[in-house]
Amino acid sequence: MKTTLKNREWKEFVIADMFNSKIGKSIDGNKVDKNIGKTAYITRKESNNGLDGFIDFDEEYLNIDRPVITIGNETAEPFVQNFPFFTGTKVNILIPKLKLSENTLLFITRSLRMHKSKYSYSFTINSTRLKKQILLLPVTLKGEPDYLFMEAYMREQKAEIMEVYKNYISNRTAELEKSEQVVSLAGKEWREFFLSDIFTNIQRGRRLKKGDHRAGEMPYISSTATNNGVDNFISNKENVRIFSNCLSIANSGSVGACFYQPYEFVASDHVTKLENKKFNKYILLFLATITTRLKEKYSFNREISDTRMKREKISLPINAKNEPDYDFMENYMKKLELAKLKKYLAVKMNK
């Protein structure tokens, strides 16, 4: 029988009665390299489980309790962390007083998230307010939190989602199997091309101050090197630049980080749009990987100006006409996706 939230008895509980809380230790995210480390760096971001890259840092600052809930002061977005991680002083860490599973904590974050709207940058969910926060949870006949029910409910939710994934992968692999065979990258001839010869529209985004962000559902792409460049979700429509179906490349910050953006997004002035309406998803994914190599010659102190962007060159596989071989790029990326999907499915089926 399917586990349901209906006809359940619910009761209010105070965070301080269920969790011990602490804040992260002082780590300046602007002074650590988030691209080459091995340990997760969790911040107050509202997406990607709070992950803002991977860093190497003093183990004295490492959080080893797990599983725990992290929740950013200003964003009030809760996530479950089930691995050691680093974080800063703007992130609260909730450590359950009883040994609770990851699934149970995921259920509790749903209740926590219902209170998110009352917090903001001017009224943060600091450690004092967090301890007093009330949660509404299903209870047993004794009026205690029904952790067994929470665990069972989340297990079913995960199973349903996994079934959808498996069906998608099965259909997708059947489709990709039809793509043409390709030679290896080493088997192709390569040649350099100016970005301005490859992309017909190169345009920088527009500055939008953090305090002017209005909450919404449109991705805000900035110069972060993780999470496809997504830095926030906003609803701003005026005095911004909205792009879609193109590449975004960081011209400052994580200079050179390049991502394919299939959806509409607001671009900050720290990224530049690389667009050619003739290119499909697979060609753009191939070009994004090649273009990202530009970061090797730039740094935080040496940005890619608009002039430099148009003068930059990338090396691409060519066809018999000495032109970029876009058919090869498309089929190569399709074969790569097929291999990844098969590997992912094999891992999930063995769990």
Image: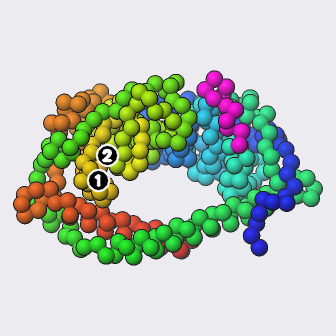
Q: Residue at x 34, y 35 (%)?
A: 271
Compare residues 27 and 206 and report the one nearer the observer.
206
Question: Residue at the right extreme?
Answer: 142
Q: Residue 284 got which mark? A: 1
Are dots 1 and 2 in contact, CB under 8 Å? yes
Q: Residue at x 29, y 50 (%)?
A: 288
SS class, disc 1? helix
Q: Position of residue 265 (x, y in %)?
A: 42, 41
Q: Based on the displayed image, in which of its 4 quarters is residue 152 positioned?
A: bottom right
Instruction: Classify 10 Å Cα crowding around label 2: few (below 14), some (14-19), many (20 and above).
Output: many
Q: Which residue is mark 2?
A: 247
Q: Amino acid at mark 1?
A: Leu
Q: Quadrant of the C terminus?
A: bottom right
Q: Position of residue 29 (x, y in %)?
A: 47, 32
**With 90 as the anchor, is 228 left or right in this view?**
left
As for residue 323 lying within the magenta part, the answer is: no
Q: Residue at x 20, y 64 (%)?
A: 328
Q: Which residues are magenta?
A: 114-124
Compare residues 238 and 10 and report the one nearer the observer.
238
The colour mode here is rainbow
Q: Position of residue 262 (x, y in %)?
A: 38, 51
**Picture layout, residue 272 above or below residue 68:** above
